[in-house]
Amino acid sequence: MLTRFCSNINLKNSVLVLLLPIFTLFASNTWAQKCPNYPNKYGLKIISCFQDYQREVKLNRNNELVDLEKQIPTIKLEIRYATTLNFTGKVIYTKAKAYTRYPVAMALKSIQDSLAYYKLGLKIFDAYRPYSASEKFYKVYPDTNFVANPRYGSRHNRGCAIDLTLINLSTGKELAMPTEFDDFSNRANPQNMNFSKEILQNRTFLFKIMAHFGFLHNSTEWWHFDFTGWERYSLMDLHFEMLSN
């Protein structure tokens, strides 16, 4: 009886060993199915699955989306798209967070450190933006002078664009600039010189310090800056809940 029992145990173990590769393959296929390649009507490759994002980060640390509040504790956020105080009049983001790719975050940290000498700092209005949010923006305001066409995607979708202004560190107040954030008028154009000396000096100072650390200002929005080399990064549609867990 004992011999038969042990024999049965060994047989079961042998069956398990034989089936293990099958179970592993099944589990692997099941996991892979969690990362489908959703077709984009424009034929764009968009990272929309957290596992795919993790693979990109493993290949190159520069692909990491960094939480700016954690990386730069002195930075101020005013994420308008997490409120109704934006051009859509609706809450677009479920969390008031600001993420950028790793090199962008490091450059912003250097800028913040440099600004401290002048007792100034950065206030962030927007950073990484999910592709689906850009689609919503375009439906509301399909003017490519101010809103990216989903056909091409946005540099915000790549984690390489930042919307910001300067603040006085001691008071927290914004420095005088040509317009408020998301003012879709000619007053926002960086070439517009019809402003007071103070405003022009503030804007010029902002452009110079951003350029020094690798950012180019947008041609129609004084607050929008693109990081050099943005084209090397993937478009993404990762929601903030994925990134903050």
Image (cartoon, rainbow, N blue to C red):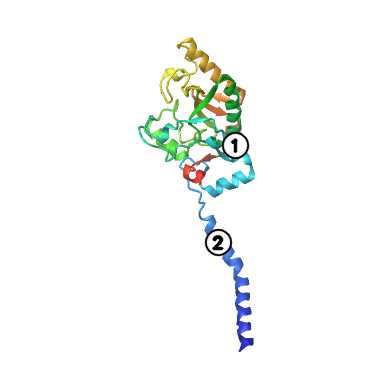
Q: Nearer the viewer, residue 178 or 231?
A: 178
Q: Amino acid at mark 2?
A: Ala
Q: Nearer the viewer, residue 49 or 142?
A: 49
What's the CA distance linking mark 2 and mark 1?
A: 32 Å
Q: Element under label 1?
A: helix
Looking at the image, which residue sits at the far left? 89
Looking at the image, which residue sits at the far bottom? 1
Residue 164, position as x, y percentages in the image: 50, 26
Q: Element under label 2?
A: helix
According to the image, label 2 marks what residue?
27
According to the image, label 1 marks what residue?
102
* Quadrant holding the N terminus: bottom right
Q: Is residue 17 above or below residue 76?
A: below
Q: Is residue 27 above or below residue 149?
A: below
> Residue at left 60%, top 72%?
16
217 sits to left or right of 81? right
Dot 2 or dot 1: first in sequence order is: 2
The answer to whether any part of residue 239 appears in the image is no
Residue 147, position as x, y percentages in the image: 44, 29
> Mark 1 Cα within 10 Å, few/some/many (few <14, many 20+)?
many
Mark in the foreground, 2 or 1: 1
> Residue at left 61%, top 66%?
21
